[in-house]
Image: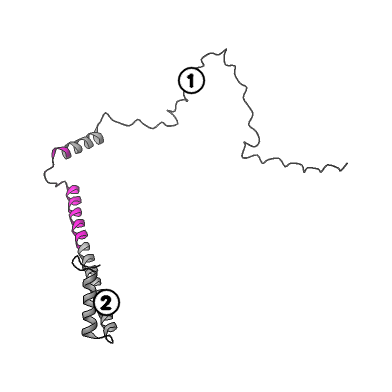
Amino acid sequence: MLGPGIGGFEIVVVALVALIVVGPKDLPMLMRKVGQFLGRARKMAAEFRASFDDMARQSELDELRREVEALRTGQMGPLDKDTKATFADIKKGLYDPNDVPPAKPTALTKTPPMTEPALDAAAAPAKPARKPSAAADPETPPKPRAPRRKKAAQ
């Protein structure tokens, strides 16, 4: 990428001066060395940028570790009103004695499932219970079917 002040005309002028000064015979070798130099410079810049990013990330991690350690030990600095109110709400939700979860039902305390009362016994006749089919019973193997017979040609 070219700088902001270098345009196409300036590049042509530099190329003509290099052709005249260096000569056509040594110009390809000069261009190769300039390319290698620029490649090394870009690589060094990328390494510098990466190390700078790593240092910034490391400092952020160190700061985060200090904050977590302060939270663990309870040695936080002064808090603003909103943060204090949020912590108070959390504590209230965690330690409210009126908010006790109901006990889990055991085999002795189980109640039968609630059913809806019949609206009109005369309007809804009772249906007879159906026997479960053999296909619904997983323990009963299905009965083998008899092979089909081909119809006799008439």
Q: Residue at x 19, y 51 (%)?
A: 69
Dividing the picture into quarters, in which one does residue 35 lie? bottom left
Amino acid, disc 1: Glu
**Place of residue 1 in the rendered image (x, y in percent of width and height, measured from the top left):** 25, 67
**Place of residue 115 in the rendered image (x, y in percent of width and height, measured from the top left):** 48, 22
Amino acid, disc 2: Gly
Q: Residue at x 29, y 82 (%)?
A: 28
Dominant secondary structure (helix, strand or loop) of the stretch shown in magenta: helix
Q: Residue at x 20, y 48 (%)?
A: 72
Q: Residue at x 57, y 13 (%)?
A: 123
> Taking 35 as reference, is 123 left or right?
right
Q: Residues within 10 Å of mark 2 (few under 14, many from 20)?
A: few
Which residue occupies the foreground of this view, 122 or 149? 149
Question: Relative to 102, is 6 above or below?
Answer: below
> Taking 49 as reference, is 120 left or right?
right
Dividing the picture into quarters, in which one does residue 104 lie? top left
User: Under tag 1, what secondary structure?
Assistant: loop
Which residue occupies the foreground of this view, 39 or 102? 39
User: Under tag 2, what secondary structure?
Assistant: helix
- Residues rendered magenta in the picture: 55-82
Question: Relative to 61, is 84 above or below?
Answer: above
Which residue occupies the foreground of this view, 131 or 25? 25
Q: Where the C terminus falls, by quadrant?
A: top right
Q: Rounded to the nearest whole Å, what is the CA distance between mark 2 and mark 1?
A: 87 Å
First in sequence, mark 2 or 1: give its number. 2
**Place of residue 136 in the rendered image (x, y in percent of width and height, measured from the top left):** 62, 36
Q: Which residue is mark 1?
A: 116
> Taking 80 as reference, is 100 left or right?
right
Which residue occupies the foreground of this view, 153 or 68? 153
Q: Residue furthest right?
A: 154
Q: Which residue is mark 2?
A: 35
